[in-house]
Amino acid sequence: MSDLDLHSEAWRVPPGRYLADRPPEFDLPSAPTSRYLTMRDGCRIAVDVWLPQARGGAVPPAAVPAVVVLTPYYRRFALRPGGKAEVAPNAAKFRDALVPRGYALVVVDVRGTGASSGTRDSFRSPREREDSREVADWIVAQPWSDGRIGATGISYPGAAADFLASTGHPAVKAIAPLFAVWDTWTDHYYPGGILLNRLAQTYDDLMVAMDHDRRDLLRNVSYYADPDYAGPAPVGEEDPDGALLREAVRGHLGNFRQPDFMGDLRFREEPLPYDPGFSSASISPYAYCEGLRPDVAVLAVSGWLDGAGYANSAIARFLTLRDNPVHLLLGPWDHGARCNVSPWRRRTEPEFALMGELLRFFDHYLMERDTGLQREARVHAFALHGEAWHAAPSWPPVETVERLHLDADGTLAKEPGTAGADACQTDFAWGSGQGTRYERIAAIDSRDYHTDWREREARLPSWTSAPLPEAMEFTGHGIADLWIESSEPDAALFLYVSEVEADGTVRYVTEGLLRALHRKEAPPPPAYRAAWPFRSFRREDAAPLVPGRAERIRVPLLPVSWVFAAGSRIRLSLAGTDADHVGQVPHGRPPRIAVLRGGVERASALDLPLRPWRAGVAGRAS
């Protein structure tokens, strides 16, 4: 099976068809032009510009729209003598799709990285946001610019596109944050209020290798292991002997260190003790969204195994920016769509024409071409196990919720049974493994996902439904609505939903995680609209558990679109940790957790947005 869009009825014009009908008109230059831009504080920012070149009789317009990629992962590599590797691995797909079709591509080393000078004072520093405004000023002053700017990028550069648009710069007309966070705290490093400590360390390892030009370390990262790579590319004629590059790299030795920095952000939006104006909001796009003009178009893209909350970010972006023209695309992908994560895939690499979707978006909003995009549904999602795209006018697409009650003997039932409890002792050695949603965001080249899930899930307490009489589509955010007693004043709750097929095969579907300290719910704020139970994760809303006292805790599951086959059963499993990705909660004191079930007042349940699956009718929204 495939994520290919060409034969899908979810689009009037599938992205792959649009791409095929919009062939390249111009050539790429053999190399970009590069230069330094001097920022307000004297910091030198390295910039590459790729401009379309004449092909035969086709001459590009004198002035073209520009698309910007702001990256900490090198705008371009230098190559060893005779090297033939791709010089711009983080920008090549955008370059090859956009420049031959009449766009300028501007790729920028953010301050403190690559060939740019300065130091990084934080992850997604507000200083970078101000730099992006100055870069935009420079672009529109160039003779090749038609005054219109777009921005895109995967992960960090995607959030940088949000930051650029939030400056309110009048030239910015469209952004495509791909696989990018809206809230760095909840959707990236502290999902459910639980620090992903392994992620913080592996990201630090990557950035030390890049920022310090430690090529011996960088070769351990699969994305950059090519022996042709010889560090960041110097800036052309302005740095003929590489002296400015060497000076910049020396300055990068003072960059912040990720584990220490993230450890200082223990509560969401709590200021740093040494800077009352800086908190997790300072490094999150949502905090600046009021600066986004309502005419700026947004293409939000994520995947079902995209980290611990990137899909939530894409959905929150869609729900929050309701005055903007926003499009939402959710596919069967990991972080960056490097893999099709479906167990039923026919090949590892995605076949969906993501660059066709991106090109159509920029054509519509930057070039003002008649693309027909306004006639397409605003939401497109891929149903795993159904192996089909479907369209919807809004999110969530499935409004009917089915409630399955935790019952005796490890069952999920339609109605609550007799009151009782199931107790389990947390095993701090249990982990979800290495082929999960977490590895790819740590720059680990995962290709196969949850291949040993049956064995891992078998070690957890679980509750399983009766076989389904017909195929059912689960699209959206499920909620584990639990009554919990804990032996300790804190606990980490990891809830997993699986499909148990008729032959006994157990498939991972999705998960949710929450630190009990942060169980208090709150209405979502205007800058982060959510279709699931929201928490502030602020210090004033945190509260220890009282050991032995029952508490109602609703744990939202990460979003997914999944089809349970007829004859399959739905299973909910519970863990008190994931030793492969997080630390212990609480340290050295594994809690004994009792899940209350049945009765009237304290009946734990699983709420899932379900509807019958009808293959072939999940097509275009009218």
Image (tube, helix red, strand yellow):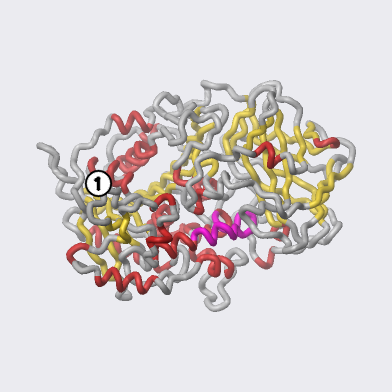
Question: In the depicted view, which residue is nearer to us: 610 or 307?
Answer: 307
Residues in magenta, as a range: 188-203
Residue at (67, 33) in percent of width and height? 506
Secondary element type, mark 1? loop
Question: In the depicted view, which residue is nearer to us: 501 or 55?
Answer: 501
In the picture as drawn, the residue positioned furthest to the bottom comes out as: 274
- Overall secondary structure of the magenta stretch? helix
Mark 1 Cα shell of 10 Å, populated few (<14), some (14-19), many (≥20): many
In this picture, residue 139 sits left or right of residue 397? left
In this picture, residue 583 sits left or right of residue 91? right
Name the spot of residue 195 as percent of width and height, x first.
61, 60
Residue 492, image quadrant: bottom right
Residue at the spot of label 1: 103
Residue 24 at least partly seen: yes
> Where 93 sits versus 278, above or below?
above
Type of amino acid at the residue the image marks with label 1: Tyr
Count of marks, rendered view:
1
